[in-house]
Amino acid sequence: MSFLDTNIVSEMCRDRNVAGAKGHRISSVVAMELLLTSSTSATSARYYIPMPSAAILNGLHCPLAGKNVRVGRRDHAYGKSSTDSMVTDFAGDFGSIVMFGNKAISATIGDKRGDLLRSAASFLPKATRSVIEERFRFLVESEMECVAVSDPNIHVAMDLLWEFSRKYTLKASFRNSWHDLLILAVALCNGDQLVTEDSLLAKFAAEVPGVNLVSHAKSVVLCPERRILAASSPTERQAYVNRGWKVREQNARKLKR
């Protein structure tokens, strides 16, 4: 079972290639990029998806009543505290990154909660909502599993970032480079292939011990020989740990309507 990078899934969605997408997985980072949750700020989101469990408790969905309660259109976003967050602090070496809805977006896709997604995004412009809803339908129809980023994934991504930043130039938007490395880290930690069109990411991944490449016409498949739970030596890892790089998770606290 392979993980797919954002561009690969986006092209499959555009071509309505449901059959080709079946059986594959995406990370929550890819889901966030596809469903346009990210804003231009590294510490906020365009919109916030509540945890489905919190939404059930607050009456947005009533399975026990044998029917769904239709969620009305909103003129504003749910609050930040309505969803989970993961704050990665690079101690001034790079800007801090806050990832909102990591668990929520995975659960929303897994539970097929299109009603909740529509409610969360309903204040956005119609054209933006249409893109979000079309892509969500594709993910549901293709039965693609969405895997939330975990704490070990973050630490492997930190390993990768430490190595990458010493050899290559980061993108103008640091968050874009961080997302690329997170997507790679999730695949490595799961011991699964990653299909990507990112030639630089593929070149870098080939330098990670235990990762092989298989090139195709437009894409590259990164093939780890095993689960990779550390991408740098203990000495190199201690270097950035000593610099104060750390991650902090926060669960959803309150659903604000």
Image (cartoon, grey):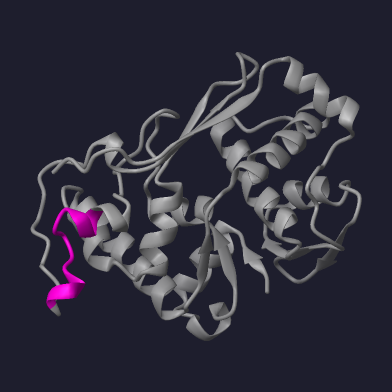
Residue at the bottom extreme of this rendering: 19
Q: Position of residue 190 (x, y in %)?
A: 71, 60
Residue at 64% of width from left, 40% of height from top?
Answer: 154
Work out whether residue 19 or residue 218 is closer to the camera in this orientation and state it.
19
Residue 150, x across and y down, in percent:
59, 47
In the foreground, 49 or 194? 49
**Over which residues does the magenta segment extend?**
55-65
Identify which residue is drawn at 65% across, 53% down: 186
Please say whether residue 64 is one of the residues in the magenta stretch. Answer: yes
- At which x and y percent is residue 113? 29, 67
Q: Is residue 234 left or right of 6 when viewed as pictured?
A: right
**Quarter of the picture holding the C terminus:** top left
Q: Name which residue lies at 50% across and 81% down.
A: 17
The quarter of the picture where residue 115 lies is: bottom left
**Is residue 255 one of those drawn in magenta?**
no
Q: Is residue 181 left or right of residue 109?
A: right
On the image, the x and y values in percent for residue 254 come to 24, 39
> Can residue 202 be seen at all in this image of the molecule?
yes
Vertical order, 126 against 13 (above or below): above
- Dividing the picture into quadrants, the one containing residue 83 is top left
Q: Is residue 127 visible?
A: no
